[in-house]
Image (cartoon, coloured by chain):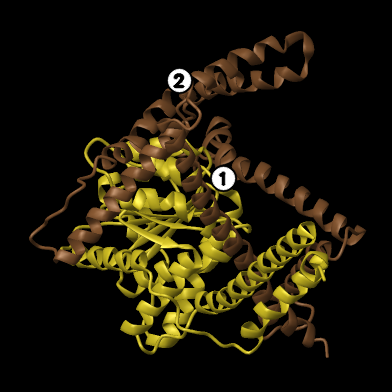
Amino acid sequence: MNYGLKLDSRLIFLLVFIVVAIPLVYDSSIKPAKMETANVTYQELEKLAENQKNGKPALVLIAADLAPSTQSENEPQTSVLIEHLLRRRIPFGLISLIPFATPYLEQMPQEIVTKLAQETGETWEYGKDWVNFGYRPGSTIMIQKFAKSKDLHEFFKTDAQAIPMKKLEIMKGIKTIQDIPALIELTGTVGVFNVWLQFFRSDQHVPTLIHGCTAITIPEAYNYFITNQISGLLEGVAGAAWYEELLSEVYPARKPGHALKIMTALSIGNILIIVLIGIGNLQELWNYWKNKRTRNF
Amino acid sequence: MNYTLFTLSWFETILAGISVLAIYSFLYRENKFYRLFEHLFIGISTAIVTIEPIKTFFWQTTLKPLLGLDRLAFPDGTYVADYDFNYLLFLIPIFFGSLYYSILVPKYSWLAQITIGFLLGISGGMAFNATMVEVTPQIIDSFRPLYINLPEQSARENLINSLNNIFFLIVLFSTSCYFFFTFKRKPNGVVEKISTSGRWLMMGCFGAFFGTTIMARLALLIERLQFMVDHWWVAVMALF
């Protein structure tokens, strides 16, 4: 009666596939779990919006270091944070150390702006509300040069579309790292977050750091959060789903994004895996107990 | 989302869906369909990683100014500014970096060691600086009060935070003990017992890592399934 151990792994794959597909096909979602780290991140962005009212030119930098392998988690995180920045009219610039991120840097803000325009009737403009610095190779060397640059116009020269910096309204008054109050870094790739943390700073100024990580890197990222090395953290797709919930509370007309859908399917998939682990362990215990009894006789 | 037949976005979506099916077909068994798309993926990834730095960095910031191609020209063909000969200095680091490729010629492979040595020196220096910036705040944070009695917090919060810090210290101490190999440990000795408890605590940590890894892998599957349901299936149905 060793059913658990003889189960074909393909049957488990099929079971997982069916279970996670159900909420996607029926377009259903459940309320996500409250994430304290996402709450803190939300408040940090609200603080930036308040500081923006002081009138000093400032640009939030989003290092969207995502790739197809981390897209499922980093993309919803980037989307909700961009949406929040756009709604609060906080200018931001997108940059990446990962060459595969190039299409995301172009598409994501455009898609969100279209969605927001339909909802609010307001308009947002490239070059005024956001800028795409594109993929920048060089990792550590690039970040160090960026942080120490006395003239960011000279450092970047052009945006990703080869538009000179001086022609972009958003870049007026942005000269050094001191004009960048916050860095939002989103990645799941090993070693990428660390180089931003280590080198994106100057002697006079250390920008507020917000990090969006994948589920795998949560235990590692949490070290930085509890030691206040980062001021905000989005923990995988769960963090993005709760952030969506926070946005939906403040903006009731908002259409739900896909972080909530992914989270719903993920929750059901996790329950299935817990059940399967439970069954497997019970099966092992049963075998152990049965063998022990047979040996005694 | 609606798709118009035989447009670029329709072809992109159909091809992306076929690629997803090909890669997931491995879950059933090893097959040629999977291998074909795996090789395509490797080829495309390598091409992107090679071309993007050349296109966005080497060409834009190095080759174009070096060749004088970034100068603005008047309609009569004359240039706004003269060629800046300082750009010829770029040839020095280009030559120095290119020595790395001498590793491919056995007779001159020793030249590559100069470049490698230079890079190792730079990396070592930066790693030292980086580690200090990254790890020092974590070491400082490890010195936590074991008894908290803050007036702005309730008695319950103070108690929970105190217990949290005590537990943190136990974990830190026992885990550090596990990696302490300076002297011989006595079997069933105090240090051995503490290090064993450190091993168990680390096992708990690895369990958390395993759980979050499952979450991340499932999220990858769900995102692709969402694409198949919301986009690919719609594009396929546009055929009928």
Mark 2 lies on a secondary structure that is loop
Write the residue at 65% across / 67% down. Answer: A277
Whole-percent x and y of residue A130? 39, 63
**Gap in angstroms between the C-alphas marked 1 and 2:** 51 Å
Along the line of sight, the residue nearer the viewer: A77 or B28: B28
Name the residue: 46% across, 27% down. Answer: B84
Q: Colour of chain B?
A: brown
Is residue B3 found left or right of B205 in the rendered image?
Answer: right
Q: Colour of chain A?
A: yellow
Residue identified by numbered label 1: B56
In the rendered view, tell whether residue A85 sits above or below residue B182. below
Query: What quarter of the picture does the N terminus of chain A occupy?
Result: bottom right
Looking at the rendered image, the quarter that the C terminus of chain A falls into is bottom right
Along the line of sight, which residue is nearer the eye, A16 or A114?
A16
From the viewer's perspective, tell me whether residue B32 is left or right of residue B166.
Answer: right
Residue at label 2? B182
Considering only vertical position in the picture, is A80 above or below A284? Answer: below
Q: Can residue A63 be seen here?
A: no
**Observer able to see residue B172:** yes
